Image: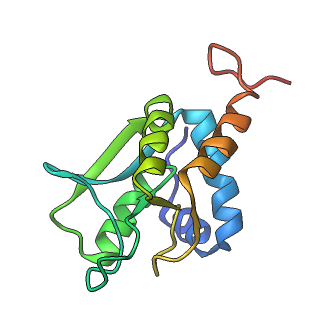
Amino acid sequence: MAQLRPEEIDKLFKKPGEKRYDYFIKTVADTEEVFGLADEEGWLLLGDEDNEESEDILPLFPGAEFAERFRVEHGFEEYGIGIVDVNELLTWLDEMEEDNMVVAVFPDLQASGVVIAPAGLKQDLAQELEKYDEEGKKLK
């Protein structure tokens, strides 16, 4: 996939949450990679630290450049860019569902956007992945 220019990254971040969600699904099915922020202890989770009842929210991005821009915007200097294969993500989503976590799919720079249950994201990704053959080529 071609490297996006900074103005293209900005433009995508400014799209409504549903458009970013659609972009995420199509891009991840095409590249078979998902990005987030991670350190030695694991992946960055968002949530209300003052409220122990709040759900853990895993922000995921369709490209490293988006994760990096989010990292810088929010001052998460201690985190690097984490990458996971889409098939491994599908397994993670089952575990996340059991742990009552949710996913922030391609949140914007204000950390808002589509927040979805792991099962919903898994279903949408699996449906999009069915459009590809074994070599990862999109079917007609």
Q: Residue at x 30, y 71 (%)?
A: 72
Residue 48 picture quarter: bottom left
Q: Residue at x 64, y 47 (%)?
A: 25
Q: Count of labels shown?
A: 0
Comparing 123 with 38, the one in front is 123
Q: Quadrant of the C terminus?
A: top right
**In the rendering, at what x and y percent does residue 52 appear?**
29, 77
Q: Quadrant of the N terminus?
A: top right
Image height check: is 93 above or below 56? above
Rendering colour mode: rainbow
In the image, farthest residue toward the right: 140
Residue 134 picture quarter: top right
Q: Is residue 139 left or right of residue 115?
A: right
Comparing 16 with 45, the one in front is 45
Q: Residue at x 52, y 50 (%)?
A: 62
**In the rendering, at what x and y percent does residue 51 appear?**
31, 83
In the image, farthest residue toward the bottom: 50
Q: Is residue 15 left or right of residue 111?
A: right
**In the rendering, at what x and y percent does residue 109 appear?**
46, 76
Comparing 65 with 38, the one in front is 38
Q: Residue at x 13, y 48 (%)?
A: 40
